[in-house]
Every structure is written in structure tokens, then in C-alpha cells.
């Protein structure tokens, strides 16, 4: 809304350092998803995890959110985190 708000933590949104730091921190998430045998794609801090059912996707969303927040100590934006269903 055109207002500047100083922050003591994080990196500026859209800054060149942000994607690099995301990839460094979320490398551990990639390893965890591979360990669980979950197919996924990730670009910087955006991810898609593919599940066989909507129910499985909801369970994965909850457990991965706990992992990201509890193990990696990162904050998950729950408003932007969604489960979508694609019929194939």
C-alpha cells in the first residue's frame, strides 16, 4: 500500500539474496521429501508436492508444515499454503 516498514529480520522481498538463502535453507526440505518418497518441485521458496489423494495431500501438508516450522525453524504462510486437487 505504498508504506515502508523497517524489519530487523529476513531479507528484502525481491532482493537478489532471498532466492539463494531460500535454496540453502530449503535444501533440507528437499532431502526430507526425498526420504519420504514424495514427488515435488520447488523454485526458491515455492513448492508443489504431489500426492495420490486429497486426503493424503492434507496429511502431507500438516506434517511438512510441522517439519518446516519445528525442524527448520522457518515460518509457513498458512494463508498461501493450499491443497489443490487435479483429477487425472
Image: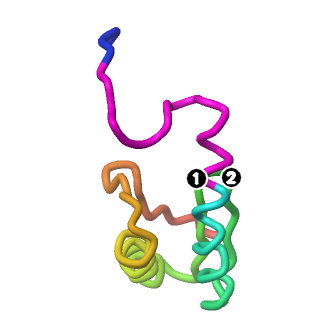
The residue drawn where x is 59% and y is 41% is: 18
The quarter of the displayed image where residue 30 is located: bottom right
Mark 1 sits on what residue? 46
Quadrant of residue 63 within the rendered picture = bottom left
- Give SS at disc 2: strand
The quadrant of the rendering that contains the C terminus is bottom right
User: Which residue is outermost to the top?
Assistant: 2
Q: Which residue is mark 2?
A: 43
Q: Which residues are magenta?
A: 5-22
Q: Main secondary structure of the magenta part?
A: loop
Q: Residues within 10 Å of mark 1 (few under 14, many from 20)?
A: few
Q: Residue at x 60, y 53 (%)?
A: 22
Q: Is residue 85 left or right of residue 55?
A: right
Q: Quadrant of the N terminus?
A: top left
Please state if 1 lies on the left or on the right of 55 as rendered.
Answer: left
Residue 79 in picture, x, y percent from top left: 31, 50
- Which quadrant of the figure has residue 8? top left
Amino acid at each position: 500500500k505504498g508504506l515502508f516498514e523497517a524489519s530487523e529480520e529476513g531479507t528484502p522481498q525481491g532482493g537478489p539474496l532471498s532466492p539463494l538463502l531460500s535454496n540453502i535453507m530449503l535444501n533440507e526440505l528437499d532431502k526430507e521429501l526425498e526420504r519420504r518418497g514424495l514427488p515435488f518441485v520447488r523454485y526458491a521458496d515455492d513448492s508443489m508436492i504431489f500426492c495420490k489423494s486429497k486426503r493424503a495431500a492434507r496429511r502431507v501438508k500438516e506434517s511438512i508444515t510441522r517439519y518446516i516450522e519445528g525442524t527448520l525453524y522457518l515460518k509457513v504462510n498458512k494463508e498461501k499454503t493450499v491443497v489443490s486437487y487435479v483429477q487425472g
